[in-house]
Amino acid sequence: MSEWLTAQETARQIAQGELTAVRALDTYLTRIGNLDRQLAAFLAVDSTGARAAAVEVDRKRKAGEPLGPLAGVPIALKDVLVTKDLETTAASKILEGWKPPYDGTAVGKLRAAGAVIVGKVNCDEFAMGSSTENSAYKKTRNPWDISRVPGGSSGGSSAAVAAGLCSASLGTDTGGSIRQPAAFCGVVGIKPTYGRVSRWGVIAFASSLDQVGPLTRTVGDAALILETICGFDPKDSTSLDQPVPKLTDALTGEVKGLRVGIPAEYFSGAIDDEVRSAVQRAAAALQERGAELIDISLPHTELALPAYYVVAPAEASSNLARYDGIRFGKAAKGARDLLDLYQRSRGEGFGPEVKRRIMLGTYALRSGYYDAYYKKAQQIRALIKRDFDKAWQHVDAILTPTTPTAAFRFGAKSSPVDMYLADIFTLACNLAGLPGISVPCGLTTDGLPIGAQLMGKPLDEATLLRAAHVIEKAVGLGDKRPKAVA
Ligand code: GLN
């Protein structure tokens, strides 16, 4: 079996008896064994649990029992997704050794569909970052150039899929953490509409922004996995009670009459020329197939970054209060009393970026400052959402670059603000609760992948997938594979 087989094709071959689930799993386990020492995408490989799941799929097939749509497909999970009896750390020392007693909803849906969970992949600590350099455990490398970052915070998810270490993965996206690493590693990543996928069993970063979504090698695989994990969940009070769309049917190859907005604010300023031209080629490809390109303006775009860096840390500071050394993970040794235990456990357990966010968030929420920061940021958020609402009167989707540059080198972003700027094009989508996808649209002259981002109306993932599928066929990476693993 080729490690580059799509998830859709893997599921089909297993269902038809042309391939066994055990064979598919072994293909990836062997590859992880050969390559992951260098790439460091995985925090934990669950060969025992994965084998048991694969054996069960093969048994069901032999017995003629019905198989789920992802039966036998090996999938890796970002380590912020809670997995029963399988260590879940959020790439933080404070959760080292924590084995959750349950599966999160999205994980449960994957298992119910027959997916084989291969293991947990690396990320920035508590999903805070854009390069996976903030992991407390290891630095994941970009398979296209191992001197560069895979993006973040879902960098293990993007690197593992790009390197063919699994069929697909799940990540989470609070301000770009699925789309940005997908762009850096030349894979597809989709952040659904806020509320589409349950956040139950997802370690919370910023609850009003977080969403789970797939990272895959094709748009078709993204559609298949997203339609499997989405749907109403009474366990998540922000879950949307909406029918589950059949997203795989959306990939018709047709974009005739589709109105695609090109927002001026995303094509000016500090953006790499090669990125700009690649995204313009993606736009031209849509136009050639009958889409209409419409110049639009999203005037509050430049306020997305400052608003996000008040809202996200504020919510994070509240969410992270639960890590006190008692309820989850490790307790510090040698504490004199309860307060000392809290202080030592949090002091030793959290890394520098997490502490920075807690301080920013606590500051913004202080009494007397609330109106000046959190409330103001929420007002800006409403303005950003209004920009999009106005745009939807004229367009069906919006096309932009996913990132201003291709993947950067380790250590290249020396200040936190420099790092925050890596997500400048992805943040607004989360603030407005909209769906967004990144699809590869070419390589730089250095051979690094470039991503095009499409943002859509609430609940309209289908249109994004349909347009991304056309871009993939016209200007995608085709059979080009990352150098480090070819
Ligand atoms: N890079 C952004 C941050 O650090 C977004 C992270 C994310 O989407 N999880 O907050």
Image (spheres, rainbow, N blue to C red):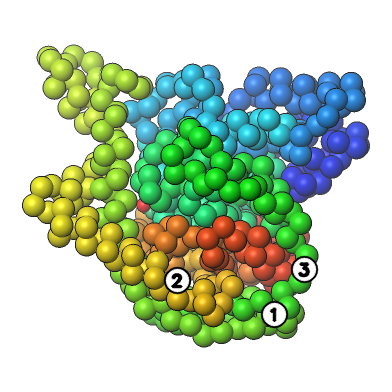
Disc 3 CB within 8 Å of nearest ligand 1 atom: no
Q: How many marks?
A: 3
Instruction: Quote the CA–CA distance across marks 1 and 3.
Output: 13 Å
From the viewer's perspective, tell me whether residue 32 is left or right of residue 294. right
- Give percent across and percent down for residue 407: 49, 61
From the viewer's perspective, tell me whether residue 365 is left or right of residue 439. left
Mark 3 neighbour density, 10 Å: few (under 14) some (14–19) many (20 or more): some
Pick whichever, 409 or 353, lies toward us: 353
The amino acid type, in three-letter code, at marker 1 is Gly
Q: Using the rendered view, name the quadrant where residue 436 is placed.
A: bottom right
Instruction: Quote the CA–CA distance across marks 1 and 2.
Output: 20 Å
| SS at circle 2 | helix
- Give percent across and percent down for residue 17: 91, 33
| SS at circle 1 | loop
Q: Earlier in the sequence, mark 2 or mark 3?
A: 3
| Residue highlighted by disc 2 | 388
The amino acid type, in three-letter code, at marker 3 is Gly
| SS at circle 3 | loop
Q: Residue at x 53, y 60 (%)?
A: 458
- 59 w.r.t. 425: above or below: above
Q: Residue at x 62, y 56 (%)?
A: 187
Residue 410 makes an appearance in the image: no
Pick whichever, 311 or 265, lies toward us: 311
The amino acid type, in three-letter code, at marker 2 is Phe
- 342 w.r.t. 311: above or below: above
| Residue highlighted by disc 3 | 253
